[in-house]
Image (cartoon, grey):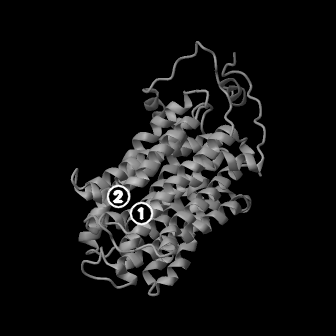
Amino acid sequence: MLNSNVQSRPKPRLTILQIVFMSFGFLGIQFGFALQNGNTSRILRSFGADVDQLPMFWIVAPLVGMIVQPLIGHYSDNTWTKMGRRKPFFLVGAILSSIALVFLPNSGVLTNVLPALWMGAGMVMLMDASFNVSMEPFRALVADNLPDEQRTSGFAIQTFLIGVGAVVGSALPSWLAKMGYSQEAGPSGVADNIKYSFYIGAAVFIAAILVTVFFSKEYAPAEYAAYHGGDTSEDKPKAKLSDIIGDFKNMPKTMKQLGWVQFFSWFALFSMWVFTTDAVATHVYGLTGDYSKSVAYNTAGNMVSSAFGVYNLVAAVYALCIPLVAKFLGRKGAHAFSLVAGGVGLLSIYFIKDPAMLTYSMIGVGLAWASILAMPYVILSGSIPPGKLGIYMGIFNFFITIPQIINGIFGGAIVKYLYHGQAIYAIVLAGILLLCAAVSVLFVHDAGAPKK
C-alpha cells in the first residue's frame, strides 16, 4: 500500500525514442486537425454557408471540447485497464475520428437525410468530439511519464510531431491537385482533391495512434503512485464526477493567470482558422460576388492550406529550439517572444498583394503556434497536484474553448456589420490579440521555473 504521505521517488529519464513513441499519436491527431482547419470553411461554404455564418459552425469544436476534455481527463485519471490509463481513450477517439474524416466531405450525398450544410456541421461535431477524446490524455501522459527536467523537451518533441503531421495534412490538398485530382466540386459539392485528402487523413490518424498504443509504456497504479506520492490503497475515497467542480474551484493560481494568455491566443487562432481563406480570397486575390464555388476560390483555399502547412513546418522546427530559447529568455520570456512574432505575422497579411508573400507571414505564426502548443503546458504542469494531471489538463481546456465560443457567437456579426464583410479585419484583430497575449504571459507566476 502506498499513501499520499510517502515520499515519491524520482521518475526515470526517458530516451528520445521513448518520448517520440509516447507522443507519436499526436502526429495523426494534428494531421486530422490540419485538414479540418484548412478545409472546413470552404467545405461548409460549398454546402451553402455564408462567410458571416462560418463562426457559428466552427463554434461546435470548442463547445464539444469544453464538455469532453474535463470528462476524459477525470476518467483517465481514475481508470486503469489492461491496456493502461490513457491508451483506451487514444484508441476509441482515433476510430471515431477516422469515421468522421471519411464522412465530412461526403455530407453532400446524404441530402435525403438532412441538408448538406447541417450534415456537414454534424460531422464537424463528431470529428471534434473524437479528436478531443484522443487528444486530452496525451498532454497528461507526457506529464505522467517525464521527470520535471525533461518536460520542456517532452512537450517540445510532442510539438515537433504535431508540426510534422500538420505540415503534411495542410499541404495534402495542393499535392493531390498537382497530381491531377479535380479541384471542381463534384456531385457531393466537394472537390476530389479535398475528399481524398480526408481519406488519407483518416488512415494516418489511426495508424499514428496505434504506434503510441503498442510502443509506449504507462506506469501501473502502484508504480505511478510511487513516482507521484499518490495513494493506491483500496480504501481510499472513490473519485466522483462531482469532484470536477471542486477541482475547478481549487485550480492553481498559475492556471488562472495563464487563462488570460490562452484567451487572447485562442481567440486569435480561431479567427485565423475561420477567416483566412475568405480574407485572402477577397483582400489578396480580389474576388468579389458569389465566389464560394469558383475554381479561383479553391485556388485561394489551396494557397491558404499550403500557407498553414508553412506555419506548421516552422513550428515543427522551432519546437526543437524552444528549450534553448527558454534557457536564455526563461519560459515566460520564450513564450512572449514567440507570441509577438505571431502577432506581427498576422498583421502583415493586411499589407500583402502577392499571394506568395503569405508564406513569409506564416513564419511568425509558426513560432507562436509552436510555443502555444508547448509552453503553457510546461508552465502549468509544475503547479498541478499529483494525481490531478488529467483533470486539470481538461479544465485548462476551458481557457482554450471559451474564447473560441465567444468568437463563434460574435465573430460573424462583427465581420458582417462592423467590417462590412471584409474578413481581413478579423485577421488584423487576431494579430493585435497575440500581442496582448505576449504582454499577459509576463505576469504569470511560474512555480516550476528552473532555479538560476
Locate residue 89 relative to residue 4 in the image: left or right.
Answer: left
Mark 2 or 1, nearer chain start: 2
Q: Which of the two residues, 19 or 337, is positioned nearer the viewer here?
A: 19
Residue type beneath disc 2: Asn
Numbered disc 1: secondary structure: helix
- Residue 362 horizontal/vertical position (percent): 53, 73
Locate residue 382 relative to residue 76 in the image: left or right.
Answer: right
Q: Residues within 10 Å of mark 2 (few under 14, many from 20)?
A: many
Cα gap from disc 2 to disc 1, whole angstroms: 8 Å
Residue occupying the point 39% across, 51% down = 61
Residue 434 is tagged as: none
Residue topped by disc 1: 195
Q: Quadrant of the N terminus?
A: top right
| 350 w.r.t. 451: above or below | below
- Residue 281 horizontal/vertical position (percent): 37, 79
Residue topped by disc 2: 106
| Quarter occupied by residue 6 | top right
Is residue 324 in view from this perspective? yes
Is residue 424 in view from this perspective? no
Residue type beneath disc 1: Lys
Q: Residue furthest top?
A: 235
- Residue 262 horizontal/vertical position (percent): 49, 54
Q: Residues within 10 Å of mark 1 (few under 14, many from 20)?
A: many
Residue occupying the point 55% across, 62% down = 166
- Residue 293 horizontal/vertical position (percent): 30, 74
Residue occupying the point 49% across, 73% down = 174
**Does the CB distance between marks 2 and 1 fall below 8 Å?**
yes
| 95 w.r.t. 371: above or below | above
Numbered disc 2: secondary structure: helix
